[in-house]
Amino acid sequence: DVKVTQSSRYLVKRTGEKVFLECVQDMDHENMFWYRQDPGLGLRLIYFSYDVKMKEKGDIPEGYSVSREKKERFSLILESASTNQTSMYLCASSLSAPVGNQPQHFGDGTRLSIL
Amino acid sequence: GQNIDQPTEMTATEGAIVQINCTYQTSGFNGLFWYQQHAGEAPTFLSYNVLDGLEEKGRFSSFLSRSKGYSYLLLKELQMKDSASYLCAVREGGGYQKVTFGTGTKLQVIP
């Protein structure tokens, strides 16, 4: 079974802090993703990565950056946390090939509160 | 870009059949996924369609019409544990695996 592990289930930080959310997958997947999920807005893609050191902006990258130094680890960074970044953050991974039925496998999520 | 529409909420009776619809407008298309998400949990994969037609997997089936930009998820013999949100997600064309999710349909199964 694919295991996607997020470092924290709940996290509370203060406005202006630099926040790191870590995600590790154990199935050698090429693709990794960061989403945030808010009521009424669904899952929105922040960033994704299709290879080590490669990254692509998703739909809402502002205020975030990412790092992928190793294949199994994808980090989301909030450069200067703001209250509108309070949300549930979900990490996911998937295989690249063969292109077809390659679903994303999700971690349990990190509920981040910015005070 | 992608635009994906699903009903916000649905209610159905235990033992019945329910159909959850999803319509999409995309600049490219390379497959449609359905996920189930119980409250407070991560989404889990249910089904995948890339060609027109029906895919059946036990009590769950998913249908796709690419020309109409339309899919549905059919749940048969509903059980109380099927109460969850159901997310429709579309993968863009091209080499990347970027997937855009709909806002989800919250299904409540009642006795």
Image (cartoon, grey):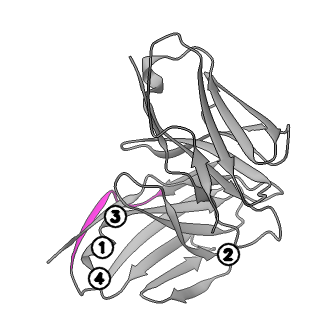
Residue shown at the point (49%, 59%) measured from the top left: B43
The label number, if any, that marks residue B50 in the structure image: 2
- Which tag is nearer the camera, tag 1 or tag 2? 1
**First reached walking from the N terminus: tag 2 or tag 4:** 2
Residue shown at the point (43%, 43%) measured from the top left: A41
Give the structural element (helix, strand or loop) at label 3.
Answer: strand
Give the structural element (helix, strand or loop) at label 1.
Answer: helix
Mark 2 residue type: Val
Left/right placement of residue A11 relative to residue A98 reads left
Give the structural element (helix, strand or loop) at label 4.
Answer: loop
Left/right placement of residue B94 relative to residue A2 reads right
Q: Nearer the viewer, residue A115 or A84?
A: A115
Residue B99 location, quadrant: bottom right
**First reached walking from the N terminus: tag 3 or tag 4:** 4
The label number, if any, that marks residue B84 in the structure image: 3
The label number, if any, that marks residue B78 in the structure image: 4
Chain where mark 2 sits: B
Q: Which residues are magenta?
A: B5-13
